[in-house]
Amino acid sequence: MARTFFVGGNWKMNGSLESTKELTQTLTSAKLDSNVEVVVSPPALHLLTVQEALKGSSVKVAAQNAYHKASGAFTGEISVNMLKDASIPWVILGHSERRTLFHESDAQVAEKTAAALAADLSVILCIGETLEQREANQTVDVVVRQLDAVAAQVKDWSKIVVAYEPVWAIGTGKVATSEQAQEVHAAIRKWAADKLGKTTAETLRIIYGGSVAGKNCKELAQQPDIDGFLVGGASLKPEFVDIVNANN
Ligand SMILES: O=C(CO)COP(=O)(O)O
């Protein structure tokens, strides 16, 4: 079954109102492959402005994080229900920067994922191993553990895109080789077949993130189990358009 190629741009904590406006204009004026689903993720403060500027284009927005409680005394947090209320369709959850710098556990990521889906949001669920774990041959164990935590709370995976982002490849310029990425993507799909069933495994989009750039995206995109990308640094540059169009 054909899976729609998915390219996300994670802008992380970058940009000003002015630079964000320019970046959005680059996207609305570019010729993007219409067979690709494109989602960009600005910082929370810029979400609504970007969403407004993208009106009429096929590009959608994602929040970079959300809290699972609907409302209340949680200073600094934004709830999944608030995203829903603002018609923000996507949320990135479990990014390695959230897991590492902000100590989000597998269980918390799972709880947030369940809450986001219950609020009818779509989720880009990030998983991936550290260099230390890869060198100890624990890569598949780590991603399976991260996925199992979510599967314990989520039965319907139809609104989840899994982003495999090896931590050692994020922001380092050290991209996984297409063989390394394909190997883990295939293991994730096998996990999905065993745990969630064959149909879900066939339709689940598994995208790669970690130093994706114009120069390496085409080879990665050709791998049978790579269904797109989650792009950090290069999503802030015009090069992002080339990554969206990697299959052309
Ligand atoms: O973390 C990432 C996307 O979520 C990847 O970041 P880079 O593309 O900058 O390595």
Image (cartoon, rainbow, N blue to C red):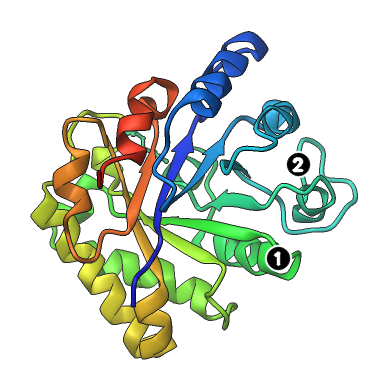
How many labels were placed on the picture?
2
Q: Residue at x 62, y 30 (%)?
A: 43
Q: Is 219 left or right of 243, judged from the image as shown?
A: left
Front residue of 9/170: it is 9
The part of the image, by quadrant, that contains residue 238 is top left
Q: Quadrant of the N terminus?
A: bottom left
* Residue topped by disc 1: 115
Viewer-closest of 167 and 205? 205
Which quadrant of the figure contains the C terminus? top left
Characterize the local packing of mark 2: few (<14), some (14-19) or many (20 or more) Cα atoms within 10 angstroms: some
Q: Which mark is residue 141?
A: none
Q: Residue at x 40, y 75 (%)?
A: 203
Q: Would residue 90 be visible to someone looking at this image?
A: yes
- Distance of mark 2 from mark 1, alpha carbons? 14 Å
Residue at 18% from the left image edge and 43% from the top image edge: 218
Mark 2 residue element: loop
Does 113 appear above or below 221? Answer: below
Q: Is residue 176 visible?
A: no
Secondary structure under the numbered disc 1 in the rendered image: helix
In the picture of the structure, the residue carrying the numbered disc 2 is 77
Q: Where residue 54 appears, x then y in whole percent? A: 65, 32
Q: Quadrant of ligand 1?
A: top left
Q: Are marks 2 and 1 in contact (CB under 8 Å)?
A: no
Kind of residue sitting beneath label 1: Ala
The x and y percentages for residue 126 are 44, 54
Q: Position of residue 239 (x, y in %)?
A: 33, 24
Bin the neighbour count of mark 1 within 10 Å (Cα to Cα): few under 14, some 14-19, many 20 and up: many
Q: Disc 2 or disc 1, which is closer to the eye?
A: 1
Q: Is residue 172 shown above or below 95?
A: above
Residue farthest top in this picture? 18
- Check the image and report above or below for 58 versus 236: below
The amino acid sitting under disc 2 is Glu
